[in-house]
Image (cartoon, rainbow, N blue to C red):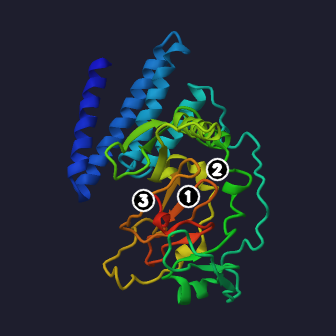
Amino acid sequence: MEDLRAALTNLLKHAHKEMASTEGMRGRGWRRIYTDVCILLAYADILDFSASTDKVEDKVFPFSALSHLDHSIVIAGAPGDGRLDAILDLIDGIQEECLGSPPNHRRDAPFVAAVPPSPNPNPTSNSNSTSNSVAAPLLSAEKSVLRLDTPPSLGTFIARLSSRPFLLPGFLLDWPALNAHPWASLEYLRAAAGPGRVVPVEVGNDYRKDDWTQKMMPWDAFLASIEELEKQRDAGLSPGPLLYLAQHSLFNQFPALREDVIVPDYVYSDLPPPDDYPEYVPPTNDEHLVLNAWLGPAGTVSPAHTVGDVDLWIPALVLIFVDRVQGSVLQLLRTSRWPEDDMAGPP
């Protein structure tokens, strides 16, 4: 077994190196190899765990297996027909059989968030009204940003608002992420993922600084770091290094969290490529969009920057954004007042 594990580990390193330098179908092939090797290493870990006589001491094996499977999703994207679903099923099985997590750990505890009901939760009502006011100037904005009292209809959005920033206060108040399944609850986020998961995090306040870095770390440890940072701030202490999860396909790892997000109809408006981005081509998946999440402690600020995709940004209690990559230069759909420096969103 050790010889096999060593051979698989060497192949994994080689596939990772090739992935970084290869594009197109050949690159996809290496990502597929990386994924399959991660699955094989996970099975090797489970075989070692099954043969162990001390299931308590040797839980390092199922944790290692879960790490390999998460790496296959995060690093390679788990390409291949049915691969992602098979990996998620395997993760569920390991958590239940090896770590004692109940099969319904994602939804087995009640969570209630004290969030007032939305005055108008329908983002695409038939009303063509764009009742609006101009928001108070942002802290460093040169111009005021349009503030809408009610969500515009889809037709109004396409005709008049798709190429400009605007604010929609309270737009997300009917999302499960702010109600029954509150992302502001770290307890809920732990339950939604189950034990032993691993995520990519960014370390540092500013990605332009030398001390900024990226690493994979346990999901539970990441959430604990948010708790600790908030305790330090409350106590008036100087907080430790800032950790946050940025521009990550969190929903591929934790499908339960995808159910907490309602994608606005504006995302599906099928606008033509913008004049300043005529070469734009939407993603080739079924929905023609990519959903990414950003997660970090309150008060985290990202330096101003640009992104290569066309985006719809949606900050919530714990910030989340939906990559709107189907053809508009819509940049902002804000639920709160942010300085212009921060409006570009997370890196």
Residue positioned most to the front:
236
Quarter of the N terminus within the rendering: top left
Position of residue 132 in the picture relative to residue 306 (left or right): right
Query: What type is the residue that disc 2 sits on?
Result: Trp
Report x, y in % for residue 320. 55, 58
- Kind of element beneath mark 2: loop
Residue 290 visible (yes or no)? no
Quadrant location, the C terminus: bottom left
Element under disc 1: strand
What separation in Å lies between label 3 and label 1 (alpha carbons)?
Answer: 17 Å
Mark 2 / mark 1, whichever is N-terminal: 2
Name which residue lies at 49% across and 67% down: 343
Residue that mark 2 sits on:
183
Question: Which residue has dot 3 on it?
Answer: 303
Q: Identify which residue is drawn at 66% across, 75% down.
A: 123
Residue placed most toward the observer, 50 or 330: 330
What secondary structure is marked by label 3? Answer: loop
Residue 61 versus residue 71 in the image, above or below: above
Cβ–Cβ under 8 Å for marks 3 and 2: no
Q: Are marks 2 and 1 in contact (CB under 8 Å)?
A: yes
- Residue at which label 1 appears: 320
> How far apart in space, not on screen, are marks 3 and 2 (Cα)?
24 Å
Q: Rounded to the nearest whole Å, what is the CA distance between mark 2 and mark 1?
A: 10 Å
